[in-house]
Amino acid sequence: MARTFLRSLVATAVGIFVAFALILIAQYAGGEVSPEAYDPLAGEILIPAGATAALIIGWFVGAFAGGWVAMRVSGRTGPGWIVAGAVIGAGLYRAVTLADAWWVIALGVAVPLVAGWAAQRTASLASA
């Protein structure tokens, strides 16, 4: 029992690391392709659509890959869903602190959930 718990704990930590590393890479790539611009008249930072699209793709790829790794390492689905929950939490935190539009907040919840579901399906197919 303790060994299973420890395995799930390590799998969750590795999955979260993988997820956030991939999200960071996606954000960096999006910033390189579509850099942010400062509008001195409005006093705001303007985030282009390309950077937002890269972030949303990063949420999917990160939650999928991190969730899949966590599910495969642990042999259970719970750690993968914890990874998806961590991505949702980070997305909501980002959306609230940057006062994003409602649709970015909705995608911050929906995209990691879909990615977690896809990771669960893929992990179960790989173990069968």
Image: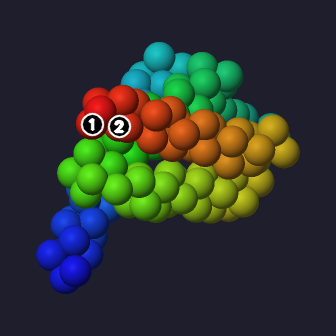
How many labels, in total?
2
Look at the image and tell me whether residue 15 can be seen.
no
Left or right: where 2 falls relative to 46: left
Q: Position of residue 110 (x, y in %)?
A: 69, 42
Could you tell me the amino acid type at mark 2? Answer: Ala
Q: Is residue 37 above or below residue 110?
A: above
Tell me which residue sits at (19%, 82%) in the image.
2
| x and y percentages locating residue 101 in the rendered image | 82, 43
Q: Quadrant of residue 48?
A: top right
Check disc 1 and report the residue beneath it: 127
Residue drawn at point x = 46 percent, y = 34 percent: 121
Reply above or below: 78 against 65: below
Q: CA distance from mark 2 to mark 1?
A: 6 Å
Q: Amino acid at mark 1?
A: Ser
Seen in the image, is 14 located left or right of residue 50?
Answer: left
Is mark 2 in CB contact (under 8 Å) with mark 1? Answer: yes
User: Which residue shows up at 27% across the image and 36% down it?
Assistant: 127
Q: Quadrant of the N terminus?
A: bottom left
Q: Which residue is mark 2?
A: 123
Regarding residue 74, the answer to whether it shows in the image is yes
The residue sitting at the left extreme is 3
Q: Secondary structure at mark 1?
A: helix
Residue at the farthest bottom position: 2
Q: Tell whether 59 sits left or right of 125.
A: right
Image quarter of the C terminus: top left
